[in-house]
């Protein structure tokens, strides 16, 4: 079934079941790789809210969760304008940090975020992104855990919005 958000139509792309299956695997990998590290998972709002809350249920090691915001996107294309990081209230010094993103597109947001996070002197920083568009990447970032590699097409749902709408969709849709 297609979904209409404002002026655009979207078609089903990644089902809730596929997301759940993939998150189970990612959660198990992260739990294994960070077994004795008490990592801090740092969710990047707003897009990652659903992904992180579901992923967290598959992480079965001692771990902490915190959220930051870095808003830079309006409409369909990356504006290139990145604002500053807000909401960081955890001390990252000497900690293993896992940045949790909804999607890496051009990589601009992520490279900017990494630059800021490095100044907090974490022990190391890993990245988990639900979605990754390899063809769109302009700013090289290494993503340690990728949910799904997708084509360079606009998607919504499962936390991702079009002009503020569609974040509540339980699965992922692609622009028709
Ligand atoms: P980047 O800085 O990597 O170009 O873009 C990162 C941010 O742009 C993401 O965190 C997300 O908020 C937004 N974004 C990039 N591609 C898409 C997309 O296909 N759909 C939606 N809804 N947001 C996107
Ligand atoms: Mg995001």
Image (tube, grey):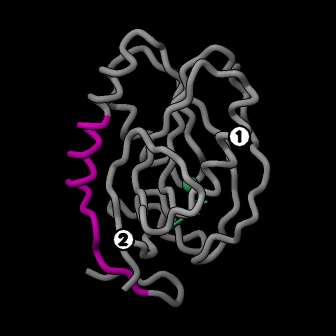
Indicate the position of residue 41 as horizontal and vertical percent values: 52, 30
Measured in 3D between alpha carbons, the distance from the residue under mark 2 to the one under mark 1, in whole angstroms, is 27 Å
Q: Residues within 10 Å of mark 1 (few under 14, many from 20)?
A: few
Residue found at the very far right of the displayed protein: 84
Instruction: From the viewer's perspective, tell me whether residue 28 is left or right of residue 98.
Output: left
Specify start and end residues of the magenta stretch as a single range.
9-26
Indicate the position of residue 94 as horizontal and vertical percent values: 64, 14
Residue at 32% across, 55% down: 148
Question: In the image, is residue 169 above or below residue 152?
Answer: above
Q: Which mark is residue 30?
A: none
Please tell me which residue lies in front, 176 or 146.
Answer: 146
Indicate the position of residue 119 as horizontal and vertical percent values: 76, 29
Indicate the position of residue 22 as horizontal and vertical percent values: 25, 46
SS for callout 2: loop
Q: Which residue is mark 1?
A: 115
SS for callout 1: helix
80 within the magenta span: no
Q: Which image quadrant shows ligand 2?
A: bottom right
Please tell me which residue lies in front, 109 or 141.
Answer: 141
Quadrant including the C terminus = bottom left
Question: In the image, is residue 7 above or below residue 117?
Answer: below
Q: Residues within 10 Å of mark 2 (few under 14, many from 20)?
A: some
Residue at 48% across, 44% down: 142
Residue at 48% across, 14% down: 38
Residue found at the very far top of the displayed protein: 36
12 within the magenta span: yes
Q: Which residue is mark 2?
A: 151
- Tag 1 or tag 2, which sits nearer the N-term? 1
């Amino acid at each position: 079934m297609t979904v209409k958000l404002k002026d655009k139509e979207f078609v089903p792309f990644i089902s809730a079941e596929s997301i759940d299956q993939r998150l189970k695997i990612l959660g198990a990998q992260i739990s294994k790789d960070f077994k004795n590290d008490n990592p801090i998972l740092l969710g990047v709002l707003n897009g990652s809210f659903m992904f992180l809350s579901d992923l967290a249920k598959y992480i079965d090691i001692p771990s902490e969760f915190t959220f930051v915001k870095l808003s830079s996107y309006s409409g369909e294309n990356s504006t290139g304008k990145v604002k500053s990081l807000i909401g960081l209230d955890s001390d990252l010094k000497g900690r293993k940090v896992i940045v949790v993103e909804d999607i890496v597109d051009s990589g601009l947001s992520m490279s900017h975020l990494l630059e800021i996070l490095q100044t907090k002197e974490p022990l190391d920083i890993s990245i988990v992104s639900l979605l990754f568009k390899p063809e769109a990447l302009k700013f090289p970032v290494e993503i340690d855990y990728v949910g799904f590699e997708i084509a360079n097409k606009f998607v919504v749902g499962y936390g991702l919005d079009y002009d503020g709408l569609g974040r509540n969709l339980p699965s992922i849709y692609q622009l028709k």
